[in-house]
Image: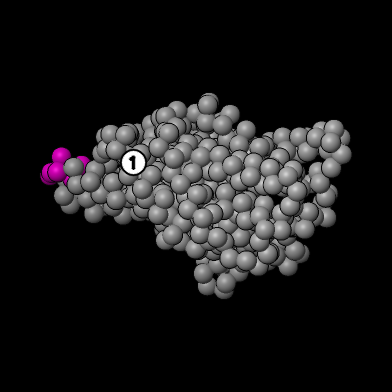
């Protein structure tokens, strides 16, 4: 490599690690918001425990997410240190803007948007891994089957319990469509990969988190009703259990989100000729990426923590435990299949789910709408920043 290429590779690695730091700073809320909101731990202790568990995450789970980021979105043939550097800058800029305003945004999707924008500017639509026709229509078929089955089951339940048929039919359809995705992945091995999986799970992951958390909290509530004579003791027990749940969620975050920087650093090294495309992920890449997101968590993201911990719904200790365990379970499942889902989406969905068990009015839907809006525009906004930056710099420097 010449001097310029070497400088770009080193700068790209540092920016990738800075992205993971920003990721941890924003996503700290996902792992400790509920445990802080219920006073199970002080903010400082919660962050320290979450940091340790997050660092362990990449070593507990596989590195499949890193491969998706590095190879499954944009054709690696057009990867250059410059392209990856610009894509990272767009992602880091968007994440930090949202963190400063206390908006729990998806760092993973910011990175996807940054890579897409730079990739489109460098190579056009032909170099983006769009879903194949078989994958797309297979997804539509699975969602349709789930939608119909859920709607039918919802209608039957409404008739049995003499409730509103239309409401149960719609809710059943939505739940059925969402649940059909993980069911298809487990039972028939259907692969939702690449860009299709990322876009699909923007919708699926928060709703799946909501469903799992709602069901888990509902079951937990019925069990706890038998022990309602001693609510104080139960609160203390669940405050302790929350610590374990929060640790599990932090480990899941590290296993999924820490791999974002790993995938980019791997792509940078391949584009510079340092590693082969089929090479194994170096240990130092895993260590530095995990360390960067851990340091980000240690720096805190207090505005985001406040928004997620108390801005959506009021959290009791047993609900905090339920939300943390549900979020960790959903994240772990997605990480196994190499899908870079949003930890933010999962966490917000589980907090909503546990809140809805007290009634729809228990959730602050105004804050939810603000977060959902940020989720929807994240990929386009980060992509636009990277696309414009690449076009402008290419005109100036002629690359």
x 80%, y 35%: residue: 393
User: Residue 300's image quarter?
Assistant: top left
Quadrant that contains the C terminus: top right
Residue 321 spot, x, y in % from top left:
31, 47
User: Residue 127 appears at what percent x and percent y?
Assistant: 79, 55
Magenta segment includes 376: no
Label total for image: 1
User: Viewer-proximal residue, 97 or 153?
Assistant: 97
Q: Dot 1: within a 10 Å radius of its alpha carbon, few (fewer than 14), some, or many (20 or more) residues?
A: some
On the question of residue 175 being in view, the answer is: no
Q: Which residues are magenta?
A: 229-235
Q: Is 352 placed left or right of 317 in the picture?
A: right
Per the image, label 1 sits on a secondary structure element best described as helix
| Residue 26 falls left or right of residue 315 | right
State whether residue 26 appears in this view.
Answer: yes
In this figure, which residue is indicated by the disc labeled 1? Answer: 48
Viewer-side residue, 33 vs 253: 253
Q: Residue at 54% of width from left, 47% of height from top?
A: 342
Residue 44 placement (x, y as % from top left): 32, 34
Residue at point 58% right, 57% down?
Answer: 66
Q: Position of residue 140 (x, y in %)?
A: 67, 61
Q: Main secondary structure of the magenta part?
A: helix
């Amino acid at each position: 490599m010449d001097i310029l290429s070497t400088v770009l590779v080193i700068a790209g690695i540092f920016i990738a690690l800075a992205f993971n730091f920003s990721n941890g700073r924003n996503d700290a809320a996902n792992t400790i918001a509920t445990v802080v909101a219920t006073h199970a731990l002080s903010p400082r202790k919660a962050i320290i425990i979450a940091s340790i568990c997050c660092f362990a995450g990449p070593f507990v789970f596989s590195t499949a997410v890193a491969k998706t980021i590095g190879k499954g979105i944009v054709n690696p043939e057009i990867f250059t240190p410059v392209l990856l550097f610009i894509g990272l800058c767009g992602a880091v800029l968007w994440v930090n803007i949202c963190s400063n305003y206390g908006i729990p945004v998806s760092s993973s999707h910011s990175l996807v948007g940054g890579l897409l924008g730079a990739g489109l500017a460098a190579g056009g639509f032909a170099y983006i891994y769009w879903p194949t026709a078989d994958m797309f229509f297979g997804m539509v078929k699975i969602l349709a089957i789930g939608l119909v089955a859920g709607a039918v089951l919802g209608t039957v339940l409404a008739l049995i319990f003499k409730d509103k048929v239309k409401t149960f039919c719609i809710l059943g359809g939505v739940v059925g469509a969402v649940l059909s995705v993980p069911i298809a992945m487990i039972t028939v091995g259907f692969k939702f990969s690449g860009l299709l999986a990322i876009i699909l799970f923007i919708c699926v992951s928060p709703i799946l988190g909501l469903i799992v958390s709602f069901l888990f909290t509902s079951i937990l509530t019925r069990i706890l009703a038998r022990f309602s004579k001693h609510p104080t003791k139960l609160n203390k027990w669940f405050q302790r259990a929350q610590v374990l749940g929060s640790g599990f969620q932090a480990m899941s975050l590290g296993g999924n989100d820490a791999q974002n920087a790993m995938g980019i650093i791997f792509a940078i090294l391949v584009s510079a000729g340092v590693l082969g495309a089929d090479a194994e992920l170096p240990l130092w890449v895993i260590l530095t990426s995990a360390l960067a997101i851990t340091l980000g968590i240690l720096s805190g993201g207090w505005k985001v923590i406040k928004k997620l911990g108390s801005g959506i719904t009021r959290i009791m200790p047993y609900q905090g435990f339920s939300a943390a365990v549900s979020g960790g379970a959903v994240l772990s499942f997605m990480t196994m299949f190499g899908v870079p889902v949003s930890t933010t989406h999962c966490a917000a969905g589980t907090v909503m789910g546990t809140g809805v068990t007290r009634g729809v009015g228990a959730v602050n839907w105004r804050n939810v709408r603000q977060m959902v809006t940020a989720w929807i525009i994240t990929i386009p906004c980060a992509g636009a920043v990277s696309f414009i930056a690449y076009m402008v710099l290419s005109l100036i420097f002629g690359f």
